[in-house]
Image (cartoon, helix red, strand yellow):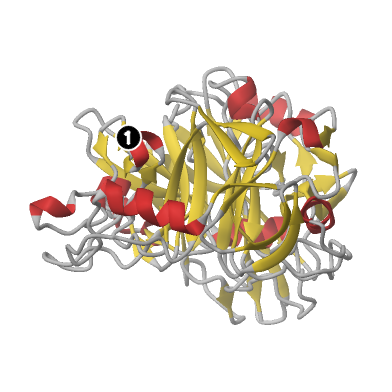
Amino acid sequence: MNKFLTVLSTAALCATATAQLPSYMTTFSQPENSTSGSGGTVLGQLLPNEITVLEFNSACLRSSEKWLPRTATHTMAGDENGDGMHFNPGILGGIDALLTVATFVAPTVMQNQRTVYYSPEVAMGTNISGAPGLRPGDIGRINRIGATDGQIEYFITQEQLNNALGLPPAYPINIDAACFQPNFGLFFSVDVDVPAMTVCGPTLIRDGDILCLPGGSMGYTGSLTIASTTINSAVRVYTENQMNVMTANAMVADRFGACVTSVIDIESLEMDLTGPTTTITPCAGYTIPVPTLVYSCEAGTGASLLETSAGGSIHNTVCGPAGVSCTTGNPTMGPQMGIRPASLTVGAPSWINALCVGRGCRHVLEPQNPVVTAPQPPGATMIDSHTPFVLGLILVELVSPVVPSSAPAFPFSPTCFPDLYAPSIFPWVVVGPGYDSFPMVGIPAAFTGKVLFQNVGFGAGVFELSTPAVIDII
């Protein structure tokens, strides 16, 4: 692998600095479209089981752009449901929570698709990962462990959360929002009401509540993931009624222009460490510091973001409010978070379903048709891509029937996708920066298997890899 990349280094003709994206990483509750149109490619179609990054240009125009396409998730996960196909359009169902660790350790660190943790709406299959897999009660990520792809690395497991909530290990919970900082701990919300035993005694946890596992109640691994939790250590820091009051105080408009007066359900959480910290006493004799929390809620259609400061307010991004005040009579449309409105008068249908602050290199590709019938002439389907680099080459491998494991690319690809999948060079030069489309190789009639794609971009003295994608040939 290193020899192959060393050979490529002699071909580097141009370079560009990797995009440093001061970003919110998000998912949306409904299929949406980027405000930019993403060059007319399939990359502009943002699905609930895909992670996007919110980009700001010099004029403060905003666009949410695809950063973890579902086809990359398929490739990393493998045939997780055991049906012989990599393509599983409903993989993860949706992404309910996003969480980063390194952001708070080194704020300028670049995230990649192997470093962000997420909680799925629907459990991932265990055909490749083995049990228990990635469940709605876990926060984890798909990674390669040793030489084996499709494995799950956990930030925290359902069993650890249940222990902190005083629940049996197998009790099914669904994490709907989460954020973490070692000094403050893990803040989270659940999707369905849960009867729990917290620090303050028996508690019915509502889906609009915000809970915390204080930093001192958890044991950590060397990578700041959770090694253990203390039984009955969860704390409810805000009740659903308190969140309803803060939401009403924020006076944000929904997609139709009506004032949002209740949360229905807390859908995402992140911390604003520049805001004030509040000391909360959830029960007599117990206090806990709580930072300013940025949140979204199910009632916040048009993709608004609120925060707990000042008793409830509309969150401000670096380019302005993440929602429209309902005092204006106007709806919250969606472009403030980089997605297109439903019409000229009605905002986008989505609420923000997951949120974290992170920076990411957007070097991605996605086939227009993830499943193709053999035989096919060259170019029968196209693969759309985005690169931040001036020049790149497409890597292609025909594999049958199993996609081989990736290999670590380090010290190459230090900021984009960190692993190499496809070792063969396809004679197609990707010219960037920006969007491009390239043809799939021809497929003979006798071939059954997969076609694996990845792009290598020429950066400033390094090679940066794109997200991989697989096309199933049937």
Q: Is residue 127 left or right of 173 when viewed as pictured?
A: right
Tell me where residue 19 appears, x and y as whole percent.
44, 29
Say left or right for 104 vs 302. right
- State which quadrant residue 446 falls in: bottom right
Taking the image as shown, residue 340 lies to the left or right of residue 86, namely left
Q: Residue at x 59, y 82 (%)?
A: 373
Quadrant in the rendering for residue 294: top left
Is residue 10 visible to the viewer in this orientation of the structure? no
Classify 270 as above or below 58: below
**Residue at the extreme front:** 284
Provide the secondary structure element on which disc 1 rests: strand
Q: Is residue 468 visible?
A: yes
Residue 54 spot, x, y in % from top left: 38, 42
| Left or right: 333 in relation to 72 | left
Residue 347 in the image: above or below residue 465:
below
- Residue 104 lies, in percent from the top left, at 60, 25
At 76% from the left edge and 75% from the top edge, which residue is drawn? 81
| Residue positioned 40% across, 48% down in the render | 65
What kind of residue is marked 1? Thr
Residue at left offset 22%, top offset 60%: 259
Q: Using a 10 Å C-alpha cutoff, classify the residue at mark 1 as few (fewer than 14 neighbours), some (14 to 19) or many (20 or more).
A: some
Q: Which residue was labeled with disc 1?
A: 317
Q: Nearer the viewer, residue 44 or 7?
A: 44
Q: Residue 106 at what x, y percent from top left? A: 60, 19
Q: Where is the C terminus found, in terms of image quarters?
A: bottom right
State how many labels appear: 1
Q: Quadrant of the N terminus?
A: top right
Using the image as rendered, state which of residue 259 and residue 268 is in the foreground. Answer: 259
